[in-house]
Image (cartoon, rainbow, N blue to C red):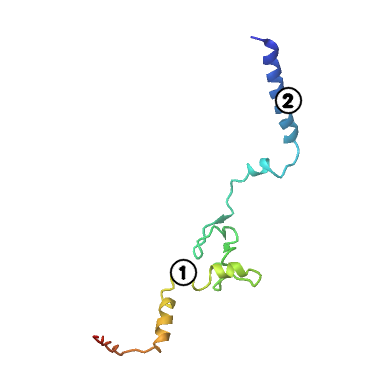
């Protein structure tokens, strides 16, 4: 057992702690600031489902809820495309191409197609 080795290792760690103590007095933008973030300014929006609803303002930064009109800007073309028609279930629109092809006929019965035997 060599006492000089144990002293040298402890001195290196103590200098490390001293370095951090010096740094703690200064204003830093990084790690120390992130430890203080424990209050939530945004929560889940009822309309769009994103965590963008500002609690104090009570408005959604993504969709603009409770405003009647959806929030959208021309400088955000990609964002528009993410929530435009054709991105959901399209419960009504998915049948429109078929109806258009048949001329929007209603109340008629389709004629039976007779298969010719050769």
Mark 2 closeness class: few <14, some 14–19, many ≥20 residues within 10 Å: few
Rendering coords of residue 101 (x, y %) = 42, 86
Residue 11 or 114: which is nearer the viewer? 114
Rendering coords of residue 91 (x, y %) = 41, 74
Mark 1 closeness class: few <14, some 14–19, many ≥20 residues within 10 Å: few
| Residue 14 as seen in the image, left or right of residue 59 | right
| Residue occupying the far left of the picture | 117
Disc 1 to disc 2, C-alpha distance: 59 Å
Residue 59 — which label?
Answer: none
| Residue 66 as seen in the image, left or right of residue 33 | left
Q: Earlier in the sequence, mark 1 or mark 2?
A: 2
Looking at the rendering, which quadrant does residue 66 occupy?
bottom right
Location of the C terminus by quadrant is bottom left
| Residue occupying the far front of the picture | 118
- Residue beneath label 2, please? 15
Residue 22 vertical placement versus 14 (above, below): below
Rendering coords of residue 115 (x, y %) = 26, 85
Residue 97 vertical placement versus 90 (above, below): below
Residue 6 or 35: which is nearer the viewer? 6
Looking at the rendering, which quadrant does residue 22 occupy?
top right
Residue 32 or 56: which is nearer the viewer? 32
| Residue 5 as seen in the image, left or right of residue 71 | right
Location of the N terminus by quadrant is top right
Which element is circle 2 on?
helix
- Residue beneath label 1, please? 88
Residue positioned 28% across, 89% down in the render? 111
Residue positioned 58% across, 70% down in the render? 80
Residue 54 vertical placement versus 105 (above, below): above
Q: How many marks?
A: 2
């Amino acid at each position: 057992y060599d006492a000089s080795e144990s002293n040298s290792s402890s001195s290196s760690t103590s200098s490390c702690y001293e370095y951090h103590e010096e740094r703690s007095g200064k204003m830093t933008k990084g790690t120390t600031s992130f430890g203080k973030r424990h209050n939530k300014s945004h929560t889940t929006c009822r309309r769009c489902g994103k965590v963008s609803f500002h609690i104090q303002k009570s408005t959604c930064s993504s969709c603009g809820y409770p405003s009647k009109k959806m929030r959208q800007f021309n400088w955000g073309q990609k964002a528009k495309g993410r929530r435009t028609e054709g991105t959901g279930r399209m419960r009504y629109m998915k049948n429109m191409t078929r109806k258009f092809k048949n001329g929007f006929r209603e109340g008629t019965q389709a004629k039976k197609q007779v298969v010719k035997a050769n």
